[in-house]
Structure formats: structure tokens, C-alpha cells
């Protein structure tokens, strides 16, 4: 196995990516500049898009996809050509907030039955400590009829890609790497160093690497929960939370977190993986669980504030015409997974409201399939009573107060126009001076 690295460089062996989403596809493209790469995904529609030079994730762009040398396929047997396989499938949670390992287990079955002797398998999917060795390796061994450590090697290297972030990219984020033994650690590290300019951190064990991933996202979740709790308290006190944070951030060691809705596939999910495994071991998480409760309650809090502002504006709530600008889980990305904006809208529907949505990034079909909402063209949306700035897309920042004002019913007096600014995009003084009913988180 020691010659695998050289064989990859000389293109005697191939590297394969299993799962071509927001994480796997950028990795595949990066490695294709150095090695022969196979990109595998079960989603045939996605594969056809990639083959046509279309990037549905907007992570690297159509031009990069069209010009890259990745061999895109939905044929799992192609994995048998690879000596180095990276698994980058999602790891969501179930309705009861327990880990849903079905995608990573399914990927392990596929890889196992196509695994050749001497190959390396590296998991990037976020999991709780122990999953790679206690769940994935047994599946690989069962499907391949081979033994880990003797016939093939396994490692774990958690993904750290931040969707939509054009500054912190795959190549300049330090990579945590681990392996089932010393040899595996060195080979896997060497392979990743081909594309990671920031270098790698060699973890002492697979479990340490798994734990590092869930902890770094849990830490962010807790910090945001703290700010969200302050926001709810300050709202009762009549204090603008963003103004408090602006003042606090003048100190050198301020962390710079802002209140908001915590969705997506990482920060809103990974803490549950930690809580689940900790409770299995007999420890009931207090801080992490509390942070999750605070953040999970935020959509209801925001929905109630919207109703309150509509009442202050003298609106008949059931008849209010309300538009949400943005439905993705974060700015400048088409990713709608675990969008908390939709939970705000769902809560409003209980009051008889009929929320509408615009989003220049989101895929209409995905939004309809996942959430049952139909995206509208912004030029067709006018005569509104309430606009909710839900996602800080650059295009919405560019609209400014003047652009938002044009969406309201022209016959409405200013005091009956409601703006809900979840992301704090507008200048409060400007909106207040115009006489609008304005609330921000």
C-alpha cells in the first residue's frame, strides 16, 4: 500500500469522490487538477448537469465544471477503478433529532461491494465519534469480504467547506486528517496536501478527528444561541441588539457573533450528533442541548414578532400581504437544506397568513419539493403590506431601503408599511425617519 501516493501522481491509480454535493464536488474538481478523478453520485440528474458543465451548487461555477477533467458517473462499478476513495455524503438528523446515518451507511455498502484490495477509503461526512470504526468499517468488511488494516485502509477527514464563502475555500482551510494506523495517516495526509495549501493537522486517532468536527460546529451554535438569548431579552427591554453588539465589538477580544436563524446542514445539525453519543455514554449534555433549544425556538419567536408588528401597523393579520426575501439557509448559496426561514413562514400560516417567497439563488423545484412554497419573480411582487428580509444575499443588500420601499402598496401610508429585517441589512435611522414600522432581530 505504501506506493499508492506515487501511483496516484503517476495516474496509475485513480481517486474517486462519492457524493457530489456542496462538499464533494469542489473536492473532486480540486483533485482533478493533479490526479485522475472519478466523481460518483446516485443522483442521475445531478450527474447530467455536471456533464453539461452546469454547477447547481454555485460553489465553483459553470466554467470550472465545464473545463475540469472529472469523470462524472452514476455507475457505482466505476469505483472499482479507484485506489483512493473519499466519501462526502450528507449526515442529517431524523425528526426526533437523532442522527440519520442512512446516507453514510448506504455509501459504505456501495463502496464496500466495489472496493479493491489495497484501496484507501476516507470519510468526510460529519459523524459522532465512533461511527467510522464501529459502523462504516464493518460494512466495508462485510461487503468486500476483506479486512481493514490488512487488505484496505480507512481514514477520516472532516469537511470544513463553508458553502457560499468565497474567502475561506477548500485550499486555504487547514485539513484535519486521521487514519486507522500510522501508515494510513501518512498516505492520506500526503494525498490531501496535494490540494490543501494551508496544510493538514494529523489527529492522533479517527475518533479525535470525528469529535473535532462536531465540537467546532457546536461551539458556533452555542455562541449564536447566547446572542439569540440576548436578542430576545433586549427586545423586551426596548434595546437594539445590533447596536449593543456594535459597541461590544470595539473590544479586541469580542467574537463578532450576530443573532439569527441557525439552519443548514452543519451548525443546526452537528450538535445533535454530539448530544446523541454523549447520552449513549451516560452523560446528559447541558450547555450544547440548551444552545440547541434556544436556536430551535428562534423561528417561533420571529413569527410572533411579525404578528406583533402587523398589529402595531393596524393590519388585519389574516389579510396581510407578506413577502419573504430569501429562502436558502444562508446568503449567496442555493442550498435550501434545513432552512429556518420556512419554519417562520409555517408558523405564520397558523394565523391565516399566506407567505410568499422570492430568492434569486434557490432552485424552484427544490423549494417546491422540500417545503411546498412556489418562488415568485420579484418584478411580479408589488402591493405588499410586509416585507421580511430573511437572507442576507448580496442582491438584497444592494436593494437598500429605496428598493424595498418599491415593493409596498403605493396607497399605503408609511405607518402601515412593515419591514422585518432578520439580518439587519437596513439602516434603522433611515427606515425610522420614513415612518415605517420596522423591527430587526
Image (cartoon, helix red, strand yellow):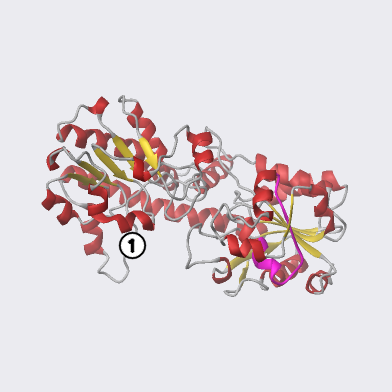
Give the extent of the magenta segment. Answer: 28-42
As drawn, 103 above or below 304: below
| In the displayed structure image, the side of residue 252 where residue 312 appears, left or right | left
Q: Secondary structure at mark 1?
A: loop
Residue 43 in view here:
no
Judge by depth and name the residue closer to the eye, 163 or 129. Answer: 163
Other residues around mark 1 within 10 Å, as few (<14) / some (14–19) / many (≥20): few
Relative to residue 175, is residue 292 depicted above or below?
Answer: above
Picture residue at 78% right of the left edge, 73% below the top: 9
Residue 409 picture quarter: top left
Number of callouts in the render? 1
Spot occupied by residue 187 in the image (x, y as percentages of width and height):
75, 69
The magenta stretch spans residue 99? no
Image coordinates for residue 430, horizontal then vertical, percent? 16, 55
Name the residue carrying label 1.
256
Residue sitting at 73 percent across and 71 percent down?
186
Left or right, 75 with reference to 226: right
- Give x and y (percent) for residue 314: 14, 31
Q: Is residue 260 above or below residue 310?
A: below
- On-image quarter of the N terminus: bottom right
In the displayed structure, does residue 68 sit left or right of residue 427?
right
Residue 137 visible in the shown view: yes
Would you identify the image quadrant in which residue 72 lies? bottom right
Q: Quadrant of residue 395?
A: bottom left
Q: What percent of the width, then of the height, locates residue 137?
A: 76, 49
In front here: 159 or 438? Answer: 438
Work out whether residue 8 or residue 394 is closer to the camera in this orientation and state it: 394
Q: 95 or 406: which is nearer to us?
A: 406
Amino acid at each position: 500500500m505504501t506506493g499508492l501516493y506515487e501511483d496516484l501522481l503517476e495516474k496509475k491509480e485513480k481517486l474517486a469522490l462519492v457524493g457530489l454535493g456542496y462538499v464533494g464536488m469542489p473536492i473532486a474538481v480540486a483533485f482533478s487538477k493533479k490526479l485522475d478523478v472519478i466523481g460518483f453520485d446516485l443522483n442521475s440528474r445531478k450527474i447530467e448537469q455536471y456533464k453539461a458543465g452546469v454547477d447547481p451548487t454555485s460553489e465553483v461555477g459553470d466554467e470550472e465544471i465545464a473545463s475540469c477533467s472529472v469523470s462524472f458517473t452514476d455507475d457505482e462499478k466505476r469505483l472499482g477503478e479507484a485506489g483512493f476513495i473519499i466519501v462526502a455524503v450528507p449526515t442529517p438528523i431524523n425528526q426526533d433529532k437523532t442522527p440519520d446515518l442512512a446516507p453514510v451507511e448506504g455509501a459504505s455498502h456501495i463502496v464496500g461491494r466495489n472496493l479493491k484490495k489495497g484501496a484507501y477509503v476516507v470519510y468526510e461526512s460529519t459523524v459522532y465519534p465512533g461511527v467510522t470504526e464501529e459502523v462504516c468499517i464493518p460494512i466495508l468488511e462485510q461487503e468486500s469480504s476483506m479486512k481493514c488494516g490488512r487488505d484496505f485502509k480507512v481514514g477520516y477527514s472532516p469537511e470544513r467547506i463553508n458553502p457560499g464563502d468565497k474567502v475561506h475555500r477548500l485550499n486555504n482551510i487547514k485539513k484535519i486528517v486521521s487514519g486507522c494506523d500510522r501508515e494510513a495517516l501518512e498516505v492520506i495526509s500526503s494525498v490531501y496536501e496535494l490540494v490543501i495549501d494551508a496544510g493538514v493537522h494529523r489527529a492522533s486517532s479517527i475518533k479525535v478527528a470525528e469529535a473535532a468536527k462536531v465540537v467546532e460546529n457546536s461551539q458556533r451554535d452555542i455562541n449564536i444561541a447566547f446572542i439569540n438569548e440576548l436578542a430576545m431579552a433586549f427586545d423586551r427591554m426596548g434595546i437594539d441588539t445590533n447596536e449593543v453588539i456594535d459597541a461590544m465589538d470595539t473590544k479586541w477580544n469580542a467574537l463578532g457573533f450576530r443573532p439569527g436563524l441557525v439552519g443548514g446542514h452543519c451548525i443546526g445539525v452537528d450538535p445533535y450528533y454530539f448530544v446523541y453519543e454523549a447520552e449513549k455514554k451516560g452523560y446528559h449534555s447541558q450547555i450544547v442541548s440548551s444552545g440547541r433549544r434556544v436556536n430551535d425556538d428562534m423561528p417561533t419567536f420571529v413569527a410572533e414578532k411579525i404578528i406583533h408588528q402587523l398589529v402595531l401597523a393596524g393590519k388585519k393579520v389574516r389579510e396581510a400581504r407578506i413577502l419573504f426575501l430569501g429562502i436558502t439557509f444562508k446568503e449567496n448559496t442555493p442550498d435550501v437544506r434545513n432552512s429556518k426561514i420556512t419554519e417562520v413562514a409555517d408558523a405564520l400560516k397558523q394565523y391565516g397568513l399566506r407567505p410568499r417567497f422570492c430568492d434569486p439563488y434557490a432552485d424552484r423545484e427544490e423549494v417546491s419539493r422540500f417545503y411546498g412554497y412556489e418562488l415568485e419573480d420579484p418584478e411580479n411582487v408589488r402591493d405588499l403590506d410586509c416585507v421580511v428580509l430573511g437572507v442576507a444575499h448580496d442582491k438584497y443588500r444592494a436593494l437598500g431601503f429605496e428598493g424595498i420601499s418599491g415593493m409596498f402598496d403605493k396607497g399605503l401610508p408609511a405607518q402601515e408599511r412593515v419591514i422585518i429585517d432578520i439580518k439587519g441589512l437596513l439602516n434603522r435611522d433611515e427606515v425610522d425617519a420614513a415612518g415605517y414600522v420596522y423591527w430587526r432581530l
